[in-house]
Amino acid sequence: MHFTIHLQTPPNPPKPSSSSSPQKQNINYHLPTPSTPHPANNPRILNDALTIRQKVFIDEQRCSPEGEIDQDEGRSWHWVVYHQSSAFSPGGDGDGVVQGEERGRLQQGGGGGGGKKVVISLDFGGDNHFDTLPRNGGDGRTGAGSGSGLGPVATIRLVPPPNRHEHEHEHEHEHGQEDHLSSGGDAPPIQTGEPYIKLTRVAVMPEYRGYGLGRALVEGAVEWARGHAREIDAAAAAAAAATSGENTPWKGLVLVHAQTQVEKLYQRCGFVTDESMGRWDEEGIEHLGMWRRVDLVD
């Protein structure tokens, strides 16, 4: 089983001259439907990400479709993992390699059967973006049913600063001189007003769970961010200019709002639970806040 990962750079970043709110900038993105699987205004990879998110969050977890597309879509980086089906290999050789590239082969070791050890390695490299996707049938789209042999199976979104405080339990981080998270000595100190990135909309299709794709996405996105602080700062500066706000360089602070059922997954990725944020309900699902600080690569 082979996987490839592709990056959608921010499809509609804020413009300094724009008076439109982020919500208005994203109003033309639409969830795919059976009758309209490829809405005209959706970039290809974002559309595949929305397809996965609809399946996982709306169909499976019964979240509201009205809240799935939010004000951050256009200014965020989106990664989508694709399963390259050998039955539909573009090269016809049955090995599942996309245009000579093998991005994330499953490395299996150990005994036979279900006891095999599976390690996922996904290349988040800079050339892995939407232009590398094989074109198909004239419309250039990918995904299940497109005939390309690429099926979108997992996704993650990275939202640059500034990030809104959407819950009351986060407000305390706006006022204190310095907040040392209460969950233990390994927690990173948070300076007043320090910008942070958010990893959101992490979703894996049900039939592809158990391969480690979720963890690979989280760790890969964090590692990508470490080496792309300049791009993150540029995105934050554009957002600040569009709203006449102040911009402060990102120093490596990362936040996730995790469903409590996957808290341990994020702990394995180096995140520490912020007990001071408590627990809260989003769409009927209990969430908690977790932080991680990373060293940036010059």
Image (spheres, rainbow, N blue to C red):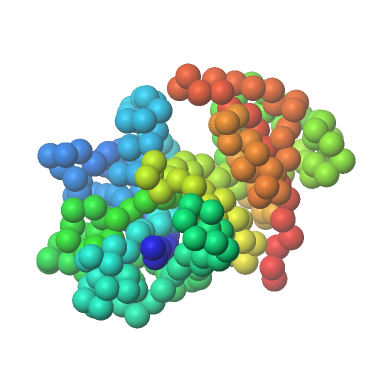
Q: Do we see residue 239 in this rendering?
A: no
Examine the rendered structure and indicate whether residue 285 appears above or below residue 44. above
Examine the rendered structure and indicate whether residue 187 appears above or below residue 261. below
The N terminus lies in which quarter of the figure?
bottom left
Q: Residue at x 74, y 60 (%)?
A: 295
Task: Tell which of 189 and 101 is nearer to you.
Answer: 101
Q: Could you say which quadrant of the image residue 98 lies in?
A: bottom left
The C terminus lies in which quarter of the figure?
bottom right
Spot occupied by residue 195 in the image (x, y as percentages of width and height): 66, 46
Q: Residue at x 22, y 66 (%)?
A: 88
Spot occupied by residue 149 in the image (x, y as percentages of width and height): 24, 63
Q: Point out the residue furthest to the right here.
A: 185
Examine the rendered structure and indicate whether residue 269 appears above or below residue 295. above
Spot occupied by residue 158 in the image (x, y as percentages of width and height): 52, 50
Q: Could you say which quadrant of the image residue 45 lies in?
A: bottom left
Q: Residue at x 63, y 36 (%)?
A: 263
**Left-right relation of 33 to 214:** left
Q: Residue at x 16, y 39 (%)?
A: 34
Task: Tell which of 298 and 98 is nearer to you.
Answer: 98
Q: Could you say which quadrant of the image residue 273 lies in?
A: top right
**Left-right relation of 298 to 122:** right
Q: Point out the residue furthest to the front here.
A: 112
